[in-house]
Amino acid sequence: MKISPVSSEVLLQSVVALSRVAGAAILNIYKADDFGEIRKADDSPLTRADMASHHAIIAGLQKIDPLCPILSEEAADVPYEIRRHWARFWLVDPLDGTKEFIKRNGEFTVNIALIESGRPVLGVVYVPVTGVCYFAAAGVGAFVLRGDSAAQPIRVHEPVPGSPLRVVASRSHSDERTAALLQALGEFESVSMGSSLKLCLVAEGAADFYPRLGPTMEWDTAAAHAVVSVAGGIVCSIAGDELCYNKADLHNPEFFVCHQNAVWLLDHARQVNTR
């Protein structure tokens, strides 16, 4: 079932408001001395803030859209035999960038996405520490909201061949392959960032290219992917296929993020990466 542009706008604003509720729950714990950190089965960290945000979002989405199923990183054990029948569902990362949260560097986000037929059609990425919110919906537009200022529309910047690229790299996941790729691209300016904010920097035109040559999960990218797409960008595999969602293993392939018309950049990056 597709949603109309009018209802999309109302739904988008409701999810933006919900992301702030979840962000407030995170900040209550961010100010505490003890995060209640434990290690999950994959050795990634989990804190009381992850769960507080998770519970706030689940409760909020059930009120906003009671018939739509929800898949959250902190409740991702829904069997694929059930999930594969979902034509429409919410995909949530209650606290993206838990490592950044633990480091107290502020670069963590609340991610909420609506998936339809495997594609993200609505996404909200909220930064609790700064209050910055990136949000978008198909048929509505892509925006950034900073503090009390009015929301501003955003667009992905289309780089010009031969000009220096602004490349965004992971704060916590640097690797030799990415470094080699960047060196082969020629002159570039590197911007480090944590969590899904890397995709949002491309969405708002503050960076031209984000290569991710490492593992991610679908909930890590879905909300920001929606923002990038509506803002005129693409999130695609190295082979050039746009990322899709609700796969059996919920893993993303390695991917590139840039303007949808920057075919020359994708081709060059692909050739370098496959040498």
Image (cartoon, rainbow, N blue to C red):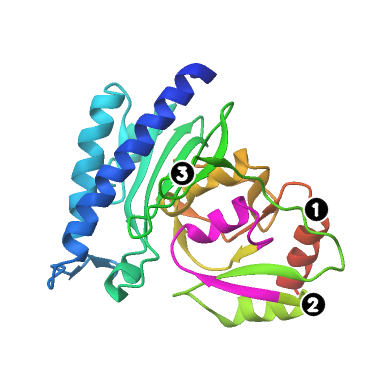
**Label number found at residue 247:** 3
Residue at position x 52%, y 78% from top?
174
Residue 56 coordinates in the image, percent (x, y): 21, 42
Amino acid type, label 1: Val
Tag 1 residue: 263
Figure check: 82 above or below 109: above
Q: Are marks 3 and 2 in contact (CB under 8 Å)?
A: no
Residue 217 coordinates in the image, percent (x, y): 43, 55
Amino acid type, label 3: Lys
- Which one is earlier in the sequence, the residue at label 3 or at label 2? 2
Segment colored magenta: 189-209
**Mark 3, other Cα within 10 Å: few <14 / some 14–19 / many ≥20:** few
Residue at position x 28%, y 51% from top?
23
Residue 65 coordinates in the image, percent (x, y): 31, 24
- Which one is earlier in the sequence, the residue at label 1 or at label 3? 3
**Label number found at residue 186:** 2
- The answer to whether residue 163 is magenta is no
Mark nearest the camera among 2 and 1 is 2
Left/right of residue 202 with respect to residue 252 in the rendered view: right
Left/right of residue 137 with respect to residue 229 in the rendered view: left
Q: Quadrant of the C terminus?
A: bottom right
Residue at position x 48%, y 19% from top?
3
Q: Are marks 2 and 1 in contact (CB under 8 Å)?
A: no
The Cα–Cα distance between marks 3 and 2, rounded to whole angstroms, is 35 Å
Residue 77 visible within the image: no
- Which one is earlier in the sequence, the residue at label 2 or at label 1? 2
Q: Secondary structure at mark 1?
A: helix
Amino acid type, label 2: Gly
Figure check: 97 above or below 172: above
